[in-house]
């Protein structure tokens, strides 16, 4: 009974991991479309960050879940899971900061036209 | 040009792809020189067979990491001279700092830095980098890594802090030019001591384990339950000190010069 319950839980975790990887692929496709079709630099950078967070962090967490329940990997499955999770965490910390620095610098130096715009709080602060 | 890749960047990208394809073609045809001869392959087989040969310890290095064994045991002289080259380069760069290298930074300076997000993130990442670099250096005789790799990755942490906050934050944190130079010298002295200690026992210089034709019994590989890996761990630790401190010296001197306070540094 307990063994059957464990097998079911493993199957569920495996399914969640597969779902996360698929979601990551969809996010990557959307990010590529947005990178080509969006009108200005800032919105395109938003699309690129979708590609990094949704297309790299989410599938890496999925990979760590899948490798946790892959018995054929033996004791190495914990290593794979830990490395994947840690990489996801690292990307989640660094990628938004990089985008933030780029956007901040572009706004400060006025390098890119801010065409479709509703409100610009940073411009108000600077005045 | 809005809404697409500009014509010049498209030309550059296609040129790069064409160039790499041509290079791949010539490499596959053998146009960039032949493969190494069979006599060189024999050296690799010798090293793989003898690095951690517990049954026949005549030529062993006492470490399962073949790369670290080559770097610090079989080809130790090469690494010593590499360290010398880096030492000379850093000394030559320090000569460019006006006003000498002694003394300490006077004014704390205004902490400009970037935004709060960047400051926090660079602090977190620099902590992770320090842990990773120590892991690379201290476990360099078991898994891939070593003193040089660990030292150069350790130097990324202060560089991140300089970029995100400012060089004055780094100085207030305790990274002083004089302190870094002292630690560098300590590492160099350690390298000299570890590599010339076998000479006292009528052994070879940079000798790690006992070899035929020398009286030196070799550095301890096992110390009770601990696995030490001969002289490789000491070499890695001292090389880590030397390389990381030399990079930090260069960064601090460079960025202090950039702030116009080279005379007081």
Image (cartoon, helix red, strand yellow):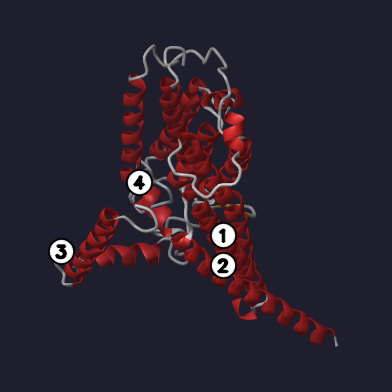
| Residue named by callout 1 | A50
Judged by depth in the image, the label closer to the viewer, 4 or 3, is 3
Indicate the position of residue A22 as horizontal and vertical percent values. 59, 75
Determine whether the residue tagged by mark 2 lies in a helix, strand or loop.
helix
Q: Are marks 4 and 1 in contact (CB under 8 Å)?
A: no
- Marks counted in the figure total 4
Mark 2 or mark 3, which is nearer to you? 2
Mark 1 neighbour density, 10 Å: few (under 14) some (14–19) many (20 or more)? many
Q: How far apart in space, not on screen, are marks 4 and 3 (Cα)?
A: 28 Å
Q: Quadrant of residue B44?
A: bottom left
Which chain's residue wears label 1? A
Q: Residues within 10 Å of mark 3 (few under 14, many from 20)?
A: few
Which residue is label 3 attached to?
Answer: B33
Q: Is residue B110 left or right of residue B217?
A: right
- Report the chain holding disc 3: B
Mark 2 belongs to which subunit?
A
């Amino acid at each position: 009974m307990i063994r059957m319950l464990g097998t079911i839980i493993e199957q569920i975790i495996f399914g969640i991991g597969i779902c996360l990887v698929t979601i990551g692929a969809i996010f990557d496709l959307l990010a590529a479309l947005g990178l080509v079709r969006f009108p200005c630099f800032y919105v395109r950078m938003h699309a690129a960050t979708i590609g990094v967070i949704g297309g790299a962090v989410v599938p890496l967490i999925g990979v760590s879940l899948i490798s946790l329940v892959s018995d054929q990997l033996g004791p190495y499955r914990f290593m794979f899971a830990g490395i994947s999770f840690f990489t996801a965490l690292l990307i989640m910390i660094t990628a938004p900061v990089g985008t933030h620095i780029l956007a901040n610098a572009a706004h400060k130096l006025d390098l890119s036209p801010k065409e479709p715009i509703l409100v610009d709080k940073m411009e108000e602060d600077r005045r | 040009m809005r809404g697409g890749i500009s014509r010049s960047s498209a030309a550059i990208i296609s040129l790069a792809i064409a160039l790499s394809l041509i290079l791949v073609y010539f490499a596959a045809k053998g146009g960039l020189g032949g493969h190494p001869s069979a006599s060189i392959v024999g050296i690799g087989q010798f090293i793989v067979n003898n690095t951690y040969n517990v049954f026949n310890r005549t030529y062993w290095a006492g470490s399962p990491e073949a790369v670290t064994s080559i770097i610090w045991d079989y080809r130790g002289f090469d690494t010593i001279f590499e360290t010398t080259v880096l030492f000379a380069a850093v000394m030559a760069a320090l000569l460019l700092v006006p006003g000498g290298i002694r003394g300490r930074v006077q004014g704390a300076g205004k902490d400009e830095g970037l935004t709060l997000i960047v400051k926090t993130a660079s602090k977190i990442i620099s902590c992770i980098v320090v842990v990773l670099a120590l892991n690379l250096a201290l476990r360099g005789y078991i898994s891939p890594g070593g003193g040089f790799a660990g030292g150069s990755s350790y130097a990324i942490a202060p560089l991140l802090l300089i970029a995100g906050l400012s060089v004055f934050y780094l100085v207030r944190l305790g990274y002083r030019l004089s302190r870094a130079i002292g630690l560098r010298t300590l590492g160099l002295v350690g390298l000299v001591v570890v590599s010339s200690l076998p000479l006292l026992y009528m052994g070879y210089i940079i000798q790690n384990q006992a070899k035929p034709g020398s009286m030196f019994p070799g550095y301890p590989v096992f110390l009770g339950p601990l696995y030490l890996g001969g002289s490789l761990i000491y070499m890695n630790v001292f090389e880590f000190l030397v390389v990381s401190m030399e990079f930090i010296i260069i960064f601090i001197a460079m960025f202090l010069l950039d702030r116009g306070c080279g005379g007081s540094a």
